[in-house]
Image (cartoon, grey):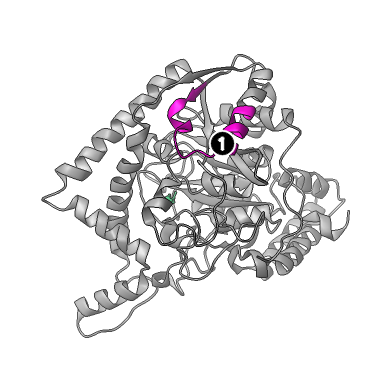
């Protein structure tokens, strides 16, 4: 296999070659670093690459394999991490000026688990500042472009992670999903993305945005890789108070069971106004493929869906305003001296935060303030309960719900950047899932107008095995994972 093609492998394929000595981790890593050098000037997926670290991690894997160690699947596989995941010794900025120069003294649990499985880190990926956004245009540092068409956004906020995987600049990546930030960019870039059940993957070391909504999730080229990454990162962690007890795992080993008798609900509200006809057609075709494989699909209704976006944009900013209070110029990153203490806070926060982050802090502070708490925050929490209950009722009848991940395919750079409400609307199919704390997966289901479409499969808490099995069945029955663009052309 030529060096040029190594970046096209899935993690699973690369792992088999490493195991069979057809390839060393160092060769694989060098091929990925060469691919990064070739396409990164156009794609801009990485905020920072860690080539030396990657090569030294790869060599270590080769050494232990040579010494006869039986290594985990992901050993020696090059990956990328969103820049809100703490990496000891490697700067972690959330793409915000306020964290410029901050180097965490510890690793996020998800990363330390990958590391002990022998992961190779190629770098930290671009994102919307503090994960607030749907296009990567809110990054304080750079723009990332969609490898399918570089005039388009990669989605967000984990757009750098999705673009890196789609462009062959990493074999898999981690992102975070508070309202859709793993699934939406996965859909836009034609890769697989999973938002796990709240509490299944430790949030320790993930810089907090909306603490009751945040989950770390994988972005991968195919469903099998998604299961491998979940096998490595899921499971209880005493360092995260919201981490679920009990055993996780068995994701990759459970992929092959098929979907005979699987009850699929198709919520009509997710196919409402604003959904592009090409997206609707691709998603319905994909549901048809699952039915051919033995699943039973039936239309259903989730009438509170329309309130979810409003509820999210009260609760997420409320939590963000509290979480971001810690960035005061004293403890992390940027500090601008300006007279007294208060002057220092003001100057640091005014300069350090970008406009979208400030908007969220203001909304959040407002909905939590004494006079408005009952009218906004408390009411939003009540409606959140209704949304969660509605999902629970649906899951009494259905094993999974199937719908589009996003109402449209990727949109042009600059299209929504000046219109926050239009940007918020691109999360309409993903935010209800975070409010309910349940898992959902986006798997590519073909193209509309030459651009990837995501099929979203939503399940009850801890149904990841079912979601992955259904997605895998679809992927196999539809001719295998989507082929990613080989040529990445400048806009
Ligand atoms: N786009 C949504 C927001 O801006 C979701 C972000 C996320 O999931 N991190 O809040």
The question of residue 4 being in magenta is answered with no
- Outermost left residue: 371
Residue 158: x %, y % from top left: 52, 54
Q: Main secondary structure of the magenta part?
A: helix
* Rendered residue at 33%/49% (across/down): 316
| Residue 482 in view, yes or no | yes
Say left or right for 361 vs 71. Answer: left
Range of magenta residues: 265-286
Say left or right for 22 vs 424. Answer: right
Depth check, front residue: 416 or 122: 416
Residue where numbered disc 1 is placed? 277
Say left or right for 443 vs 368. Answer: right
| Residue 119 in view, yes or no | no
Q: Residue 16's quadrant in the figure?
A: top right
Depth check, front residue: 115 or 186: 186
Task: Specify the quadrant that holds the C terminus.
Answer: bottom right
Q: Dot 1: what SS?
A: helix
Residue 51: x %, y % from top left: 68, 68
* Rendered residue at 27%/34% (across/down): 383
Residue 93: x %, y % from top left: 46, 67
Q: Residues within 10 Å of mark 1 (few under 14, many from 20)?
A: some
* Rendered residue at 45%/71% (across/down): 102
* Rendered residue at 60%/38% (across/down): 278
Residue 344: x %, y % from top left: 26, 79
- Outermost bottom residue: 339
The question of residue 285 being in magenta is answered with yes
Above or below, 380 against 353 in this view is above
């Amino acid at each position: 296999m030529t060096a040029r093609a190594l970046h096209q492998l899935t993690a699973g394929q690369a792992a088999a070659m490493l195991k069979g000595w057809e390839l060393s981790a160092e060769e694989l890593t060098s091929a990925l670093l060469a691919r990064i050098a070739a396409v990164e000037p156009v794609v801009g997926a990485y905020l920072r690459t860690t080539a030396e670290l990657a090569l030294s991690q790869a060599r270590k894997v080769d050494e232990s394999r040579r010494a006869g160690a039986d290594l985990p699947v992901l050993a020696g596989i090059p990956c990328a991490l969103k820049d809100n995941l703490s990496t000891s010794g490697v700067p972690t900025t959330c793409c915000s000026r306020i964290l410029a120069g901050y180097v965490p003294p510890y690793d996020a649990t998800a990363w330390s688990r990958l590391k002990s499985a022998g992961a190779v880190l190629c770098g930290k990926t671009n994102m919307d500042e503090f994960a607030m956004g749907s296009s990567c245009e809110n990054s304080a540092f750079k723009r990332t472009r969609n490898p399918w068409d570089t005039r388009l956004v990669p989605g967000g906020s984990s757009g750098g992670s999705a673009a890196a995987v789609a462009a062959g600049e990493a074999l898999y990546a981690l992102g975070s999903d508070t309202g859709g930030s793993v699934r939406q960019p996965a859909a836009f870039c034609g890769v697989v993305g999973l938002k796990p059940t709240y509490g299944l993957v430790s949030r320790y070391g993930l810089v907090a945005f909306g603490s009751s909504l945040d989950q770390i999730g994988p972005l991968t080229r195919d469903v099998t890789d998604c299961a491998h990454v979940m096998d490595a990162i899921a499971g209880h962690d005493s360092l995260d108070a919201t981490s679920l007890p009990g055993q996780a795992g068995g994701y990759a080993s459970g992929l092959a069971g098929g979907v005979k008798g699987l009850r699929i609900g198709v919520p009509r509200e997710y196919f409402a106004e604003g959904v592009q006809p090409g997206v609707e057609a691709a998603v319905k075709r994909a549901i048809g493929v699952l039915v051919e494989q033995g699943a039973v699909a039936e239309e259903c209704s989730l009438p509170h869906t329309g309130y979810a976006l409003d509820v999210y944009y009260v609760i997420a900013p409320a939590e963000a305003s509290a979480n971001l209070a810690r960035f005061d110029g004293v403890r992390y990153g940027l500090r601008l001296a300006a007279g007294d203490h208060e002057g220092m806070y003001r100057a640091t926060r005014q300069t350090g935060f970008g406009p979208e982050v400030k908007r969220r802090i203001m909304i959040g502070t407002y909905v939590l303030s004494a006079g408005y708490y009952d009218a906004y925050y408390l009411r939003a929490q009540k409606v959140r309960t209704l949304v969660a209950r509605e999902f629970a009722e649906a899951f009494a009848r259905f094993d999974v719900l199937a719908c589009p991940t996003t109402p449209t395919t990727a949109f042009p750079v600059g299209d929504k950047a000046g219109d926050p409400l239009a940007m918020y609307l691109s999360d309409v199919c993903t935010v209800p899932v975070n409010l309910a704390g349940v898992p959902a997966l986006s798997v590519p289901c073909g193209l509309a107008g030459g651009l990837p479409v995501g099929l979203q499969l939503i399940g009850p808490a801890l149904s990841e095995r079912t979601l992955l099995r259904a997605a895998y069945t679809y992927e196999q029955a539809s001719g295998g994972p989507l082929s990613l663009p080989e040529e990445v052309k400048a806009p």
